[in-house]
Amino acid sequence: MNAKSAKKLFKKYLNNECSPEEKELLDRFLESYQDKDAFLSEFSFDEGSQEELWQKIAEKTTLEKKNGSYFNRFVFKYAAVFIALLGLVTFFNVQRKDTVKAPALLIEDNAIVLKTGDDRTQEIVIGGGETITDAEGNILASQSDDQMVYHAKSTTELVYNEIIVPKGKRFELKLSDGTLVHLNADTSLKYPVSFIAGQDRKVFLNGEAYFEVAKDPDHKFTVVANDMDVQVLGTHFNVSSYANEENYTVLAEGSVAINDKRSDGGDGEPSILKPGQKAAMAKDALVISEVDISDYLNWRNGDLSFNNETFGAIIKKIERRYGVRIENGYAELEPVRFRGVFKNETIQDLLDTFKESAEFDYEITNNQIRIKKPLL
């Protein structure tokens, strides 16, 4: 549906002429707008229609708040996908159809792996109760469900462990100082079994993690993520350092100092980040911007969130979230931008949503998905 068709449907909505299916489509579309200007900027309605449409949104907002259900959600389930391409805004409502089902995906169930300082490896099963021991059999850490907790002990020697979380899984790690680390899929973290008194705390990240750093003014905490060092004393922040993708830090609370090691070897003046800001490693500089941090933190709840992101970038998120491989044979889709949030949808539900809205076909072979240009 193009913008012209959408405006016709809005007119039917104003005149109470929509079918139940059309009304559900527009209701879900309107749910995505929490701001009047954001809504009106996407459609060039005349002034009278603008006010009438927004009044309907306001009325529905008030009604749902009275019923205890807030209207400021931006979530769809087999629902609205928004595309902005070359200035043309289109939207779609995707519903399950009783059509021929695609072959089932055979998703690989790779294990979380822990590498210890003495070169041993141990598989971690989510929901299990593993214990981590040193070479002498002393317990270093214990697992409860999806979290591994390290126990503080006095030491004068740094011994590092490394945890590797595969695609399709997430895990939590509580370090010996009490710092809680939420690890996203396809992520590895190298960290000391115990920190040493009098020395700064330092961990090494490849992938994405959210840190809730235990406050300790005497021991600075540093996350080393490729060419970016994030230094804190105690705060909450997200770091993403996937290879061949934008590397960035988003601050939720407190403050952090970002060192770009590409500039003066990291010895230059650090950039200070404030809550609600993002520091991204652009080609030649560190770029700081104001962001909606929920767009960058929803992954901790298992959500797949994207806000005006290209289809090419979204493919990488889907691969990590579901542990699948995707080959895009429809290059024209790469620059198309989408926004939305998937929660508990299966990979097939997600693909069917995009298939209907972005108009592509796909085929499944084992755990390989190939996106294809539709036949005319």
Image (cartoon, rainbow, N blue to C red):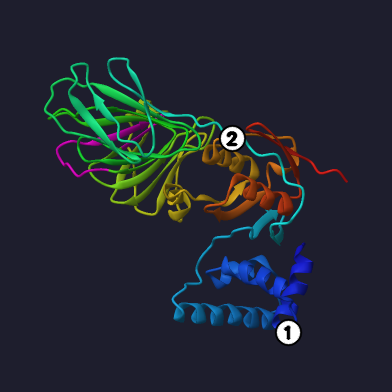
Viewer-nearest of labels 2 and 1? 2
Whether 372 is drawn above or below 19: the answer is: above
Indicate the secondary structure of the residue bearing disc 1.
loop
Which numbered dot is residue 324? 2
Name the residue furthest right.
376
| Residue 291 forms part of the magenta stretch | no
In the rendered structure, which segment of residues is drawn in magenta? 213-230
Whether 43 is drawn above or below 104: the answer is: below
Frontmost residue, 5 versus 193: 193
Residue 365 appears in which quarter of the rendering?
top right
Frontmost residue, 85 versus 80: 80
Judged left or right of residue 108, residue 149 is: left
Which numbered dot is residue 84? none
Q: Position of residue 149 (x, y in %)?
A: 25, 37
User: What kind of residue is marked 2?
Assistant: Val
For the point 50% across and 68% down, the residue is 72
Residue 171 appears in which quarter of the rendering?
top left
Q: Mark 1 = which residue? A: 15
